Amino acid sequence: MANDCPKCEDGLPPWMATFADLMSLLMCFFVLLLSFATIDAVRFKKMAESMQDAFGVQRKIPANEIVMGVSVIKQEWSPTVSEQSVITEIRQETSEVRQEHLKMQDAEEQQKQQEEQEKRQQEIDEQAAIEAAEQQLQNELEEQLNELQDALNQEIDQGLVTLERKESSIIVRIQEKGSFGSGSARLDPEFHEVMARISKVLAAKPGKITVAGHSDNIPISTGRFRSNWELSSARAVTVLHSMLRNKDIAEDRVVVEGLADTRPLVENDSPQNRAKNRRVELILTRGIDEKIQDLNDLKLN
């Protein structure tokens, strides 16, 4: 009887069952991964629009806002209005504070630029004032030098007095010839008239007046003068007293120096050169600061 039973047909290969189980497990695994995953709504919407254009999907769901779904497993999408989160509020407040801070920075920067501009303008004005004062000072010194030349024309021709201009100073050199006797500090009576003309010109303009006495290098030792220091100082004081006969010259403008033979004009190698070094100098010095002050006083008045 057993031999009479028909033979069954062969089924699927044995590996097919294992392959089917494997595919089922893989599908479940990817479904689980997809269900656990979250998506970027903006990126998903762009991807959906791209897929719609690519595959010709005609169905359109109007939405006023971005889809708020969190998983692609959900089949229905509806626009929702979410409440404002705390993070959004913090960001908004931070943005407002930053704007205020930027405004403050802009105001400070503008103020700083304005201060720098005012400072530069002040420096320009000060430089212009200095240049104007220097120019006016040079003009006054030139005018004063011309006045001295006119007043002392005869003495200059005789070689008794010489004039020199150095930057902001005028130097009046009174030679020993015609003013002092040899080894004496007594001023020649006729020279007081010359000193009166010099004093008149010096009194017309402000400035510091230095009266400096000089001698040659031949030592002197007399009953009155122990050295050339005393002789040069005594001659400077004598010229000072003669100059101060003009009451328009204030005493606080004058400084007296006795320099002996420390600052010769020429070498003391001949009688002629030594005679040039025996002199008394009146140095009128005009400072730029004084001139600026004078200009400021004029502006205030």
Image (cartoon, rainbow, N blue to C red):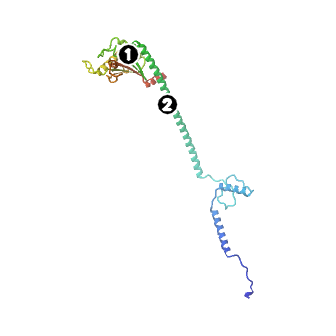
Instruction: Give the x, y percent position of residue 117.
Output: 53, 33
The quadrant the N terminus occupies is bottom right
Instruction: Give the x, y percent position of residue 158.
Output: 38, 13
State the residue in front, 158 or 242: 158
Front: mark 2 or 1: 1
Residue drawn at the location 48% of the way across and 25% of the way down: 131
- SS class, disc 2: helix
Q: Residues within 10 Å of mark 1 (few under 14, many from 20)?
A: many
State the residue in front, 58 or 280: 280
**Three-letter code, disc 2:** Glu
Q: Is residue 1 left or right of residue 105?
A: right
- SS class, disc 1: strand
- Which disc is residue 123 wearing? 2
- Which disc is residue 161 wearing? 1
Q: Is residue 119 left or right of residue 155?
A: right
Q: Is 26 placed above or below 95 here?
A: below
Residue drawn at the location 45% of the way across and 17% of the way down: 143
**Three-letter code, disc 1:** Val
